[in-house]
């Protein structure tokens, strides 16, 4: 019998899929590592298991204990699966800009969800960073995951995502492009790929309203770069320990509107139904197209599934309210190339 002993064993070995239409203006081959086939429908399953494995090894969490995390939803989903299989409770602290779908999904897999305001300073007691930390001190037998600074996050991608991409491209990858939030994905994959071939370029996708690009280019943490934005899962107002700026060659910023439109285009033109940060990443590649040559192999990682955004980017009314669908565009079908 070919069986998995539990759902956690199905994490990883995600497909690499050619992008055919959306990137036809680019000479290089563009391939997408589509992480939606993980059981929690996102790349974050990988690091959720690794972080819990390490905590167990270090004795930070005991049987029946409570896992606490501030999460935009995808990490929470991964942690929820681990909690169910290993017998822990889970509390997820979310900011109120996260989609309702993400909150409902977390509750469906047994997590307790605590919602905090988005537009407060990280050290404000109401912020989701502060609330997570407070709950961790108040709850007996609990462990605060802290995906931002917990380096098991990037180790998971060094150990699994990086090697998968290297093997799937027969070592031909020349560029790796991915949205950056905690930095775990880019830093783990980037470190692995650069050890294999130091010429591989590692490119982070950032949002307007986030500190990463400017910090990378100037070494200056500029608070003026911080303002509210819509794109989910990427960009930060802090510098997480998981971001290894040394392995990153370039950051590209993409607007909320472009990220939303290109998320729709990925579904409509490639049949790849993925989340908002994937649209951001593919638009970033198009913005950088002069960087790529004919024989280049560009791998872009798509973090999560489109179903989490059906009330947002995939909803025409939501798009129109934010000016993301122009007058005269009746639906996103009008966004098709040519
Ligand atoms: N996209 C989505 C949808 C995410 O949830 C995340 C995680 N915050 C990212 C991209 C960025 O990944 P990482 O945290 O590994 O930088």
Image (cartoon, helix red, strand yellow):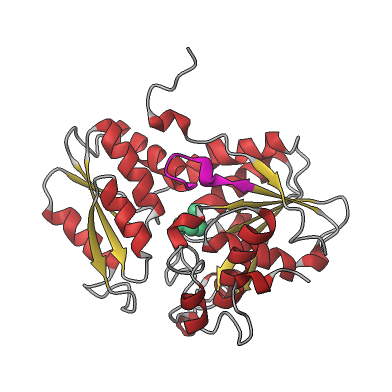
**The C terminus: image quadrant:** bottom right
Q: Image point 59% across, 65% down: which residue?
A: 264
- Closer to the camera, 189 or 88? 88
In the rendered image, residue 36 lying in the magenta stretch gets the answer yes
Q: Image point 54% across, 62% down: which residue?
A: 277
Horizontal relation, residue 280 to residue 2: left or right: right
Q: Position of residue 163 (x, y in %)?
A: 62, 36
Q: Position of residue 202 (x, y in %)?
A: 67, 55
Image quadrant where residue 89 sits: top left
In the rendered image, residue 104 lying in the magenta stretch gets the answer no
Q: Position of residue 332 (x, y in %)?
A: 61, 71
* Region of the chain picked out in magenta, as a range: 33-43
Q: Image point 68% across, 38% down: which residue?
A: 166
- Closer to the camera, 284 or 5? 5
Horizontal relation, residue 254 to residue 173: left or right: left
The number of numbered discs placed on residues in the rendered structure image is 0
Tell me if I can see residue 221 in this picture: no
Tell me if I can see residue 42 in this picture: yes
Residue situated furthest top in the rendering: 1
Horizontal relation, residue 75 to residue 220: left or right: left
Image quadrant where residue 82 sits: top left
Residue situated furthest front in the rendering: 330
Image quadrant where residue 252 sits: bottom right
- Closer to the camera, 93 or 14? 14
Q: Image point 60% across, 87% down: which residue?
A: 327
Q: Position of residue 331 (x, y in %)?
A: 59, 74
Residue situated furthest bottom in the rendering: 327
Horizontal relation, residue 181 to residue 116: left or right: right
């Amino acid at each position: 019998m070919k069986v998995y002993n539990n759902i956690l064993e199905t994490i990883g070995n995600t497909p690499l899929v050619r992008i055919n239409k959306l990137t036809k203006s680019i000479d290089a081959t563009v391939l997408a590592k589509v992480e939606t086939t993980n059981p929690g429908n996102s790349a974050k399953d990988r690091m959720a298991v690794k972080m819990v494995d390490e905590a167990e090894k270090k004795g930070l969490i005991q049987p029946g204990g409570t896992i606490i995390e501030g999460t935009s939803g995808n990490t929470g989903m991964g942690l929820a699966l681990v909690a169910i299989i290993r017998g822990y409770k889970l509390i997820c602290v979310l900011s109120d800009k996260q989609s309702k779908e993400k909150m409902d999904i977390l509750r469906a897999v047994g997590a307790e969800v605590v919602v905090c305001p988005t537009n407060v300073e990280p050290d404000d007691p109401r912020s989701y960073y502060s609330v997570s930390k407070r709950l961790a001190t108040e709850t007996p037998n609990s462990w605060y995951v802290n995906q931002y600074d917990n380096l098991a996050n990037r180790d998971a991608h060094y150990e699994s995502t990086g090697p998968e991409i290297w093997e799937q491209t027969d070592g031909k990858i020349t560029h790796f492009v991915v949205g950056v939030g905690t930095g775990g994905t880019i830093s783990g994959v980037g470190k692995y790929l650069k050890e294999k071939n130091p010429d591989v370029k590692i490119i982070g996708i950032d949002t307007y309203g986030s500190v990463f690009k400017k910090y990378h280019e100037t070494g200056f943490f500029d608070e003026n770069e911080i303002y509210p934005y819509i794109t989910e899962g990427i960009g930060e107002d802090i510098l997480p320990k998981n971001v290894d700026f040394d392995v990153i060659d370039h950051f590209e910023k993409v607007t909320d509107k472009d990220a939303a439109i290109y998320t729709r285009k990925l579904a409509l033109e490639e049949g790849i139904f993925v989340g908002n940060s994937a649209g951001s990443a593919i638009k970033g590649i198009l913005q950088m197209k002069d960087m790529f040559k004919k024989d280049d192999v560009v791998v872009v990682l798509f973090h999560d599934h489109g179903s989490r955004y059906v009330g947002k980017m995939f909803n025409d009314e939501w798009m129109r309210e934010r000016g993301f669908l122009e007058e005269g565009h009746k639906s996103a079908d009008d966004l098709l190339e040519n």
